[in-house]
Image (cartoon, helix red, strand yellow):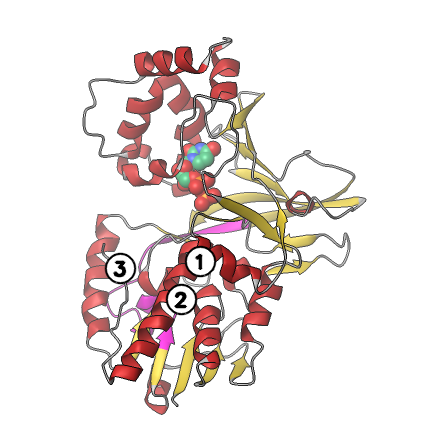
Amino acid sequence: MMSIAIVGAGFSGAVIANELAKAGHQVTVFDGRAHVAGNCHTERDAQTDVMVHVYGPHIFHTSNERVWNYVQHFDEFMPFVNRVKAVYNGRVYSLPINLMTINAFFGKTFSPAEAAAFMAEIGDKSITDPQTFEEQAMRFVGKDLYEAFFKGYTQKQWGLHPSELPASILKRLPVRFNYDDNYYASKFQGMPKHGYTYIVERMLDHPNITVHLSTLFERAQAAEYGHVFYSGPVDAWFGYAEGRLGYRTLDFEVERHAGDYQGNPVINYCNQEVPFTRISEHKHFAPWEQHEQTLIYKEHSRLCGEADTPYYPIRLVKDKAQLTQYVELAKAEKNTTFVGRLGTYRYLDMHVTIEEALNVAERFLASVAAGQVMPTFNVDPLG
Ligand code: UDP
């Protein structure tokens, strides 16, 4: 049995720790923060008793049955469907763009077929192979809806004009010609009854796992372990030798009020002149709970500085060139595997993080059994 170090107690680290501990390995987990669960961390607010998504809203959804079944071992998942509203020019609409949005926005009573024909008409057909976010939006929703719902929001979220961003960012959002206002198209969706931190604590609760919080792990310590799984920022591991990879970070203006502030978990503010991107009201993430008080986050996005918490990898051409250099450096590391959002510098939803971590653990156990070397990356960060 091996002595394993895992750097980072978010979903990547916790899933790998749990799987390897169950297989009999001795696992030591390190996290620089004072809590587990990384950016998924949840905790009860002392004043309102509301369960707060401390680093912003996290809604669990997946179409992967293995992942869905896996997470059920650690908490009960309560029914929850994310239905997002969007404010533009003083009016409220439904997101993602669906028949309600189209009819409300254009003052129509279109049927699904009429809406599809109308949207095909207003889309910019001169764009045949959309490359940028702007082209993708102009092609599929046309100028008016693009300018209302995507242009200002995206500029606030990324600090860049949509013509400088890849089409892939918008491809995350569907357009629907029916009244389905579920933000996600996933087969399964829900909220953990006791929050995400509870889940991660349970994953790490095993006699073969030791957790060190508020503890940084130095690269030199790797030599003390049979293998290291590193879920921290890949550029930090190498002391930023090739420069810093670009991230967006978030600031939250926290407010507490009596009663119900906005009547919905998330409302996006799409006008560019509104300084925040969205307001989340956290008690509505737990609709099975009752609270007289409420707590809201006004979410502001900006470029991540050296002392900030990284959230969204920017992954523009410049960042990808740097990432290529880090991938080369990483491949020369012995007995170290880079995992997760920060370790591979990719935008990852929770369910993808968990799926990838399960795959990493499985591959590692198979490599140990076969006397083979575990690769530095189990997925290609540049892919
Ligand atoms: N987006 C937008 N308007 C919205 C919501 C999203 O323009 O009201 C764009 C924005 O660029 C965002 C991307 O779509 O980064 C993906 O949205 P998603 O809701 O998946 O972002 P997340 O919840 O991960 O921040």
Q: Is residue 110 above or below residue 281?
A: above
Say what amino acid the circle numbered 1 marks: Arg
Q: Which residue is mark 2?
A: 358
> In what quadrant of the picture does the C terminus appear?
bottom left
Q: Quadrant of residue 141?
A: top left
Q: Which residue is mark 3?
A: 381
Q: Quadrant of residue 379?
A: bottom left
- First in sequence, mark 1 or 3: give its number: 1
Q: Which residue is mark 1?
A: 66
Q: Nearer the viewer, mark 3 or mark 2?
A: 2
The reply to whether dot 3 and dot 2 touch (C-beta < 8 Å) is: no
Picture coordinates of residue 54 (x, y %)? 59, 56
* Nearer-the-camera pick, 208 or 323: 208
* Nearer-the-camera pick, 2 or 101: 2
Whole-angstrom CA distance, mark 1 to mark 3, is 23 Å
Magenta residues?
229-251
Looking at the rendered structure, which numbered label has been put on residue 320?
A: none
The reply to whether dot 1 and dot 3 touch (C-beta < 8 Å) is: no
Q: Is residue 7 above or below residue 210?
A: above
* Nearer-the-camera pick, 188 or 30: 188
Q: Nearer the viewer, mark 1 or mark 3?
A: 1
> In what quadrant of the picture does the N terminus appear?
bottom left
- First in sequence, mark 3 or 2: give its number: 2
The reply to whether dot 2 and dot 1 touch (C-beta < 8 Å) is: yes
Locate residue 230 relative to residue 260 in the image: left or right.
left
Whole-angstrom CA distance, mark 2 to mark 1, is 10 Å
Q: Is residue 45 magenta?
A: no
Picture coordinates of residue 366 (x, y %)? 30, 77
